Image (tube, rainbow, N blue to C red):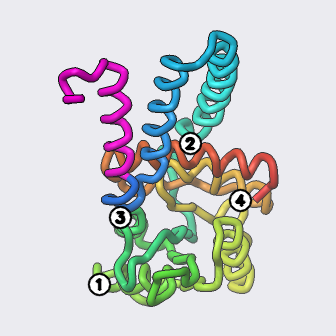
Amino acid sequence: MSLKNLPLWGISVAILIVAAAFFFFCLRGYTYISYTLLFIAALILVHRFGSDTFRRWVFILVSIGFIYFCLVELPIIKNSRTDADPERKYLIVLGAAVHGDTPSLALTNRLEGALEYLNTYPESMVIVSGGQGPGENISEAECMEDWLIDHDVDRDRIICENSSTSTMENLTYSFEIIRERGDEPDGNVAILSSSYHLYRAKTMAKMLGADVAGVAGLPGYPIYMLNCYIREAFGVTHLWVFGD
């Protein structure tokens, strides 16, 4: 059957599957966009081939899921901007993936935001936080330190925390460093992360007893950011259910 003889629903499903495969196999960091496209393709097939009862139940479940998704996204979006008057004694930059020795797009966006912050507030110290994960030749903290030094940030302003493997550990270990220096994190810390991640990071900081300012890293490509906002809904759900 030629493409011109396919029904509209068939063409739509084919396009969605091809697009999903492209995002999944050809691009790095767009997995949730791929899943979303496949989910839409599945809904089209359900609408076309499912029984009335099955379609009705799918519609109900999808509607509930969509409403929940919107409710989760509300605080994520609300906290996605830099807080007013974010100057603090310590700026904690949360790690993200490193490809070999090179910061990923997400980490580069965070580092550019950190550089802007440090130039704006020259009295602030920066704690770069992140251990070494799979596929990384160096720790995320070391990668961030090297990047900041290459961009003319004084080495004496940079503190490395290179043991953490999660956001909760990022904050826990960084707060321990601050206390070892004779300060308290409550009221003295700004957290810099990607915009979509700030709500979860600030919530974890409150769970650890610290009121912090949020600083958003520079935005990435729109489709990449959409993927991250979709993914973050699952991260926030995990936080609400399991507390980490």
Callout 3: SS: helix
Residue 6 magenta: yes
Q: Which of marks 3 and 4 is nearer the N terminus?
A: 3
Cα separation, mark 4 vs mark 2, equals: 14 Å
- Does the image show residue 84? no
Callout 4: SS: helix
- Does the image show residue 199? yes
Q: Which of marks 2 and 1 is nearer the N terminus?
A: 2
Q: In this view, does 218 lie above or below 69?
A: below
Which residue type does callout 1 highlight?
A: Asp
Which residue type does callout 2 highlight?
A: Asn
The answer to whether marks 4 and 1 mark residues whose Cβ atoms lie closer than 8 Å is no
Label for residue 231? Answer: none
Q: For label 1, count other residues whose C-alpha is less than 10 Å away and answer few (under 14), some (14-19) or many (20+).
A: few
Within the image, what quadrant is residue 213 found in?
Answer: bottom right
Residue that numbered label 1 is attached to = 150
Callout 2: SS: loop
Label for residue 205? Answer: 4
Cα separation, mark 3 vs mark 4, equals: 25 Å
Cα separation, mark 2 vs mark 3, equals: 21 Å
Q: Earlier in the sequence, mark 2 or mark 3?
A: 2
Q: Which residue is drawn at 43% across and 46% down?
A: 34
Residue that numbered label 2 is attached to = 79
The answer to whether marks 2 and 1 mark residues whose Cβ atoms lie closer than 8 Å is no
Q: What segment is highlighted magenta in the picture?
A: 1-23
Q: Quadrant of the C terminus?
A: bottom right
Residue 179 magenta: no
Q: Residue at x 53, y 19 (%)?
A: 49
